[in-house]
Amino acid sequence: MDKKPNLKLINNNESRGYTISNIKEVLSPKKFAEFEKWMRGQTVGMYKGEGLVYQYDFERFLEGLPVLD
């Protein structure tokens, strides 16, 4: 039985969020494409050389809320 990957919250100094690769693992391809479109122009942090989507932004996306900046 395949187990769906879980989101792993990264707490890196002042940055708290999810890596883009982890988000891609848990969202369907269609939902991830929507997420990429939603994230265009958004600021992301960095964690071990990878983009870190802030927890607040990802939660806003999941709730269907608009981009703030």
Image (cartoon, rainbow, N blue to C red):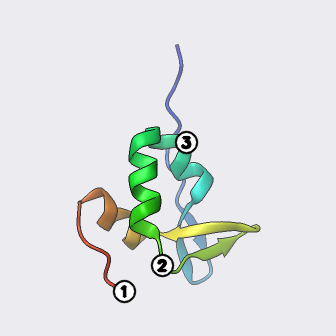
Secondary structure found at label 2: loop
The label shown at residue 69 is: 1
Residue 17 at x, y percent in the picture: 51, 67
- Horizontal relation, residue 65 to residue 20: left or right: left
Res 3 label: none
Label pair 1/2, CB-CB below 8 angstroms:
yes
Q: x%, y% of residue 16? A: 52, 73
Near mark 3 (Cα within 10 A), the count class, few <14, some 14-19 or many ≥20, is some
- x and y percentages locating residue 41 in the rendered image: 48, 78
Compared with 12, 22 (above or below) is above
Give the CA distance from mark 1 to mark 2: 8 Å
Q: What is the residue that sits farthest to the right in this orientation?
A: 49
Does residue 51 appear left or right of residue 24 in this picture?
right
**Crowding near pointer 1: few (<14 within 10 Å), some, many (20+)?**
few
Q: Specify which label sits upstream in the sequence, 2 or 3.
A: 3
| Amino acid type at image mark 3 | Glu
Q: Amino acid at mark 1?
A: Asp
38 or 11: nearer the viewer? 38
Considering only order in the chain, which callout, 3 or 1, is on the residue closer to the N terminus? Answer: 3
Provide the residue designation for mark 2.
41
- Judged from the image, the secondary structure of the residue bearing numbered disc 1 is loop
Residue 44 figure quarter: bottom right
Indicate which disc, 1 or 2, sits on the residue closer to the N terminus: 2
The residue identified by callout 3 is 25
Looking at the image, which residue is at 62% across and 81% down?
A: 13
User: Does residue 33 sit above or below 16 in this rendering?
Assistant: above
**Mark 2: which amino acid?**
Gly
Please tell me which residue lies in front, 37 or 5: 37
Quadrant assignment for the C terminus = bottom left
SS of the residue at dot 3? helix
